[in-house]
């Protein structure tokens, strides 16, 4: 019996061991599955955490080399849960700010901008700064899309920044952005995509943004191709200078010549500045162009001086970037010394002359150029600078009035009063007052009437190639046409007597500027012949004076004619008296 019980217990015990074993096995399997699931979830969470941690939450700016590593790692990630965007924020007029404020003050502004961006997007942001540009990689979500983040940053970064208690500086930005990896999967690809997109953003003006589109990477697109053409043109030195004369209209002498940059395009021909200068402003190449213009202008002036002994100045525009360059004066000294040119033959036209009393660098540059003997002109008066009272402290040698301004003299009392003030100021200080954009004789005569004798415009000459300037401008055709030098009258002309003209006809002839000898002579018994000189225009009066000095014989002839006229008048009077009797 005991043995049976033992067998039963043994059997039961065996069955119990099997159940226990199965239970243990299933338990272990469940634990393993749970562990694997936990590991998977932890790995997934840690992966996202690692990415977010690597991006950084509030660590501020990071070195460029570390940013490259981050960009390359993000570009290789393949996760549907996290989306990333690449951003480029450019500070407008960076070089001017740097030259005006100095590097230390500019660093303060960049640090403040960095802090602003971190507050706007308090998580998942990593950024670096290279000169004018911020590069950022940010996590995206439904709230923080590419477009929303661009708007947010432009609205908060474009503002006045305080530097000390009494100084504020206005800063404007442009933005470009694209999704990763659509815009690129490596740092180099992303940067190229952002630069192409930024060109389009800056073309629209300050405080604009553009989102990357795959078509921007196509080198055949018009925008990008044109951008590349300009870069190549700079390297190939395809830019040239044309020249337009400045004329003193009392004696029609050329007293100056303004240099105007042009692009000798391979297929499109000669292109004006508006076709390429805006691109150069965006890329910073405007500084190179400005210095190149000065060097070419001086070289051309030396060539002309060897060909022609007439004295006249050559001038060029200095951009805002140039006059804010702290190295401008030292560079100009080197060029002038190397070229051995007389600095008094050089003139520099500045539109942003109002910065003279604001920026120490601008004041130093303008005063330094004047000290070298160079002439300083205010360019395009009435557009960017139009305050006569602001002229008092400026070391200037001339003022160029824009056509859009002086054309309003008959319709605006403000413009009329301003120009009258400028005329009086120019006479008092002995400086040149130049009207730019004069296109016909009527405009020339009207300007001379109000006291402006220096002019520039198509009436005198279009922009000329330097090889044609001396022959086409300095010597003849246009001067002869403007003066309309009279020819000697024939015997038939002397015998011809026409009826007196009406006052309206006289005014019409005066406008057309017919020579004195070509005007029909009026026969009036009581009128003295000498009074006819008053009917001539100022241009004709100058010409008659020149003719008297150059041709004394012709003067004697005229005197004899006057004597005979007096005799015939006396005879006529005598006959009239006899008839009365």
Image: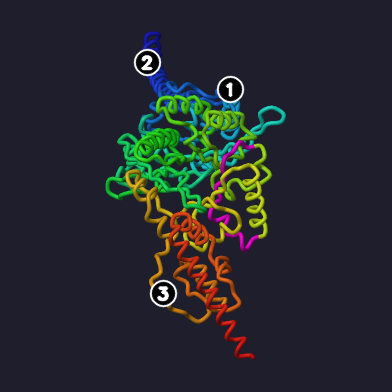
Residue 528 at x, y = what percent? Answer: 58, 72
102 relative position to 230: left or right: right
Quickly name the residue at label 2.
Answer: 14
Answer above or below: position of 552 versus 51. below
Quarter-of-image position of residue 7: top left
Q: Secondary structure at mark 3?
A: helix
Answer above or below: position of 139 versus 243. above
Quickly name the residue at label 1.
Answer: 104
Quarter-of-image position of residue 504: bottom right
Q: Quadrant of the C terminus?
A: bottom right
Cα distance between the residues tagged 1 and 2:
86 Å
The label number, if any, that marks residue 493 in the structure image: 3
- Residue range in magenta is 394-412
CB under 8 Å between discs 3 and 2:
no
The residue that appears at 44% across and 40% down in the rendered structure is 311
Q: Secondary structure at mark 2?
A: helix
Which of the two residues, 182 or 286, is positioned nearer the viewer here? 286
Q: Residue 218, can we see it?
A: yes
Q: Quadrant of the N terminus?
A: top left
For marks 3 and 2, the one nearer the N-term is 2
The residue that appears at 55% across and 80% down in the rendered structure is 571
User: Which of labels 1 and 2 is toward the front?
Assistant: 1
Disc tally is: 3
């Amino acid at each position: 019996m005991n043995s049976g019980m033992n067998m039963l217990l043994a059997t039961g015990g065996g069955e119990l061991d099997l159940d226990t074993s199965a239970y243990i096995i299933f338990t272990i399997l469940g634990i393993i599955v749970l562990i694997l699931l936990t590991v998977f979830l932890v790995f997934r969470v840690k992966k996202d955490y690692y990415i977010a941690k690597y991006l950084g939450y509030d660590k501020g700016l990071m070195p460029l080399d570390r940013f490259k590593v981050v960009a390359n790692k993000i570009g290789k990630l393949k996760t549907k849960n996290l989306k990333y965007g690449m951003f480029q924020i450019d500070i407008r007029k960076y070089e001017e700010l740097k030259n005006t404020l100095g590097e230390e003050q500019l660093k303060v502004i960049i640090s403040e901008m960095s802090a602003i961006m971190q507050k706007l997007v308090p998580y998942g942001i990593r950024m670096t700064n290279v000169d004018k540009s911020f590069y950022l990689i940010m996590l995206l979500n439904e709230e923080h899309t590419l477009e929303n983040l661009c708007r947010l940053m432009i609205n908060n970064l474009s503002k006045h920044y305080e530097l000390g208690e009494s100084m504020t500086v206005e800063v404007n930005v442009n933005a470009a952005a694209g999704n990763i990896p659509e815009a690129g999967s490596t740092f180099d690809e992303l940067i190229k995509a952002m630069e192409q997109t930024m060109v389009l953003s800056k073309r629209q003006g300050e405080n604009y943004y553009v989102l990357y589109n795959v078509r921007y990477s196509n080198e055949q697109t018009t925008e990008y191709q044109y951008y590349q053409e300009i870069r190549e043109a700079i390297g190939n030195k395809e830019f040239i200078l044309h020249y337009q004369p400045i004329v003193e209209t009392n004696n029609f002498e050329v007293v100056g010549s303004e240099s105007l940059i042009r692009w000798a395009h391979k297929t499109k021909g000669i292109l004006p500045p508006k076709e390429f200068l805006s691109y150069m402003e965006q890329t910073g190449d405007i500084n190179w162009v400005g210095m190149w213009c000065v060097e070419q202008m001086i070289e051309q002036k030396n060539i002309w001086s060897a060909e022609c002994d007439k004295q006249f100045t050559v001038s060029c525009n200095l951009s805002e970037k140039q006059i804010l360059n702290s190295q401008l004066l030292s560079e100009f000294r080197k060029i002038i010394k190397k070229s051995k040119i007389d600095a008094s033959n050089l003139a520099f036209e500045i539109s942003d002359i109002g910065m003279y009393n604001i920026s120490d660098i601008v004041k130093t540059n303008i005063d330094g150029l004047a000290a070298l003997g160079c002439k300083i002109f205010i360019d395009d008066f009435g557009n960017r600078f139009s305050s006569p009272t602001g002229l008092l402290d400026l070391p200037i040698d001339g003022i160029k009035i824009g056509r859009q301004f002086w054309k309003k003299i008959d319709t605006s009392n403000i413009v009329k009063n301003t120009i009258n003030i400028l005329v009086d100021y120019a006479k008092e200080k002995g400086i040149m007052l130049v009207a730019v954009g004069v296109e016909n004789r009527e405009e020339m005569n009207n300007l001379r009437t109000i006291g402006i004798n220096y002019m520039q415009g198509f009436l005198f000459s279009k922009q000329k190639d330097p090889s044609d300037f001396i022959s086409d401008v300095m010597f003849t055709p246009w001067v002869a046409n403007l003066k309309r030098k009279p020819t000697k009258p024939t015997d038939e002309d002397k015998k011809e007597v026409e009826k007196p003209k009406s006052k309206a006809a006289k005014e019409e002839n005066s406008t057309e500027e017919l020579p004195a000898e070509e005007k029909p002579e009026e026969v009036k018994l009581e009128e003295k012949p000498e009074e006819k000189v008053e009917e001539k225009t100022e241009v004709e009066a100058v010409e008659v004076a020149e003719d008297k000095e150059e041709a004394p014989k012709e003067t004697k002839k005229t005197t004899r004619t006057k004597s005979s006229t007096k005799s015939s008048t006396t005879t006529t009077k005598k006959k009239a008296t006899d008839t009365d009797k």
